[in-house]
Image (spheres, rainbow, N blue to C red):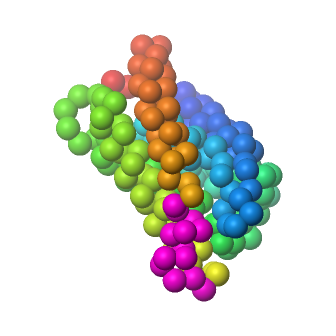
Amino acid sequence: MKAKDMALVALFAALIAVLAQVAVPLPFSPVPITGQVLGVFLVGAILGKNRGTLAIIVYLLLGAIGLPVFARGGSGLAAFARPSGGYLWGFALGVYVMGLVLERGKGEPGYGRLAVGMLTCLVVIYVLGTIQLMYLLHLNLVKGLLLGVLPYIPLDLAKLVLAAAISLQVRRALQQAGYLGP
């Protein structure tokens, strides 16, 4: 891996860590509203499947070893075993699946393909997060969706729209500067 790739992976792992600190707890759910999903969308759309997934893994490892990079300064291996831990697992798989979607078709992905890729990523995050939430809190599917998905959809869709617009510009600028391949 080239030094510029390592720098991009580290930079985007740090971006997610910063956005994770934008966290609003909800009184009815153990899952806060955070900026993490915005960061995950940007990572996948800008860095692609391999570098993007690696950036998520670096972010997760930083949190696992104790750096306060998760929502509200959370860290440690216990974060992965909490009711909200499934969403963390979902970030890596979601970015990988987003990358697969973005690789389909000819040429650089446009806004539409980015949006579809991000929506696919979001579904993966929701599925893994909800499964763990339901399992640990002994919830049925309806309650799991009410606590772990439905309240987040409007804001996550707004993040998707924003991330798709931003990532088009940032990806183009990084390509022109020689930091990303075409």
Q: Position of residue 42 (x, y in %)?
A: 51, 36
Q: Quadrant of residue 171?
A: top left
Up the image or down, 111 lies above or below 72; here it is above
Tell which of 126 and 56 is nearer to you: 126
Residue sitting at 30 percent across and 29 percent down?
Answer: 110
Residue sitting at 63 percent across and 81 percent down?
Answer: 136
Residue sitting at 47 percent across and 40 percent down?
Answer: 160
Q: Position of residue 41 (x, y in %)?
A: 49, 42
Decide if residue 104 is on the left or right side of residue 121.
left
Q: Position of residue 32 (x, y in %)?
A: 69, 57
Up the image or down, 14 lies above or below 72; here it is above
Up the image or down, 177 lies above or below 152; here it is above
Residue furthest to the top in view is 176
Quadrant holding the C terminus = top left
Decide if residue 19 is on the left or right side of residue 74.
left
Instruction: Answer yes or no: is residue 40 visible.
Output: no
Q: Main secondary structure of the magenta part?
A: helix
Instruction: Answer yes or no: is residue 58 visible.
Output: yes
